[in-house]
Image (cartoon, rainbow, N blue to C red):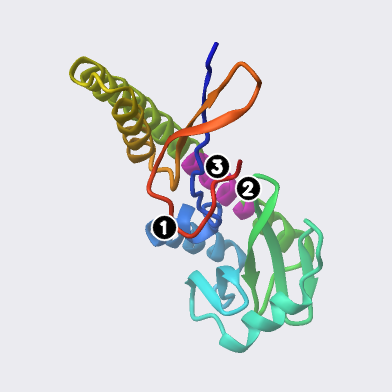
Amino acid sequence: MSHILWTLNDAMSKDENRLKKLLSPQTLTPLLQSFGAMLGPDVPLAVSDSPEHVLESHLSFPADRIASLWQAAPETDEIALLPQGAVAPVYVESRRSGLILATGALPPPPQTRLVLAALRQSLESLAQVTLERRAVAHEALARYRELNLLYNLGETLATCLNVDELLQRVVFEATRIIQARQGAVLLLDTAGHFSVAAQTDADDTPLPF
């Protein structure tokens, strides 16, 4: 008995957990203003996702301090008080995604740590909510694509009598709807060997079978 095997290679985004994808300036600005006021009127406060980039800041954050704080930040999840200022790492799904930076005339260490810890918890919670909403949206889109695929395949089955053409249409519709890079239908014969019955137009990348 023949069986149909699908092989689909989906492209995935590698940076969807970056803070700039999860936290907008409209979200960050009021948070930094509120928590910055707790640190003092002359304490610049910022959220950064790289040594060269600040997502948003309260007051003007000295450019020379950004890279130096990143360089001096320990590779742990603890809030660190350094000669240049204070840093608090921000984690999204157990992955370090950025730093909270503070510099200037910081308050006593216990107060600084308390404020930065509260800000970090707020940012991580907001990022997690964004990820969960995105996951729900992706699931809804996947369900829609599945239904669309079934509908299109139903129309194809009703109008196509040639088996080879039918398989080609099936693999084309499937790869198009789920936005895969390649797709193929493999038939398994009685000897246990697979043969390619239909596949999308191959680019220079060979199919993984």
Residue sitting farthest toward the top: 1
- What type is the residue that disc 3 sits on? Gln
Label 2 crowd bin: few (<14), some (14–19), many (20+), radius 10 Å? few
Residue sitting farthest toward the left: 159
Horizontal relation, residue 178 to residue 57: left or right: left
**Looking at the rendered structure, which numbered label has been put on residue 144?**
none
Residue 69: quarter of image: bottom right
Q: Give the range drawn in magenta.
A: 119-131
Cβ–Cβ under 8 Å for marks 2 and 3? no
First in residue order: circle 3 vs circle 1: 1
**How far is disc 3 from disc 1 in space, using C-alphas?**
13 Å
Q: Please, what secondary structure does the residue beneath circle 3 have?
A: helix
Most common SS among magenta residues: helix
First in residue order: circle 2 vs circle 3: 2
Residue sitting farthest toward the front: 191
- What type is the residue that disc 2 sits on? Gln
Q: Name the residue under label 3.
A: 128
Residue 129, magenta (yes or no) = yes
**Residue 24 image point, x, y percent:** 41, 57
Cβ–Cβ under 8 Å for marks 1 and 2? no
Q: Nearer the viewer, residue 193 or 107?
A: 193
Q: Please, what secondary structure does the residue beneath circle 2 have?
A: helix
Q: Name the residue under label 2.
A: 121
Q: Which residue is drawn at 62% across and 77% down?
A: 51
Number of marks in picture: 3
Q: Please, what secondary structure does the residue beneath circle 1 have?
A: loop
Q: Mark 1 points at which residue?
A: 24
**Residue 11 image point, x, y percent:** 49, 49
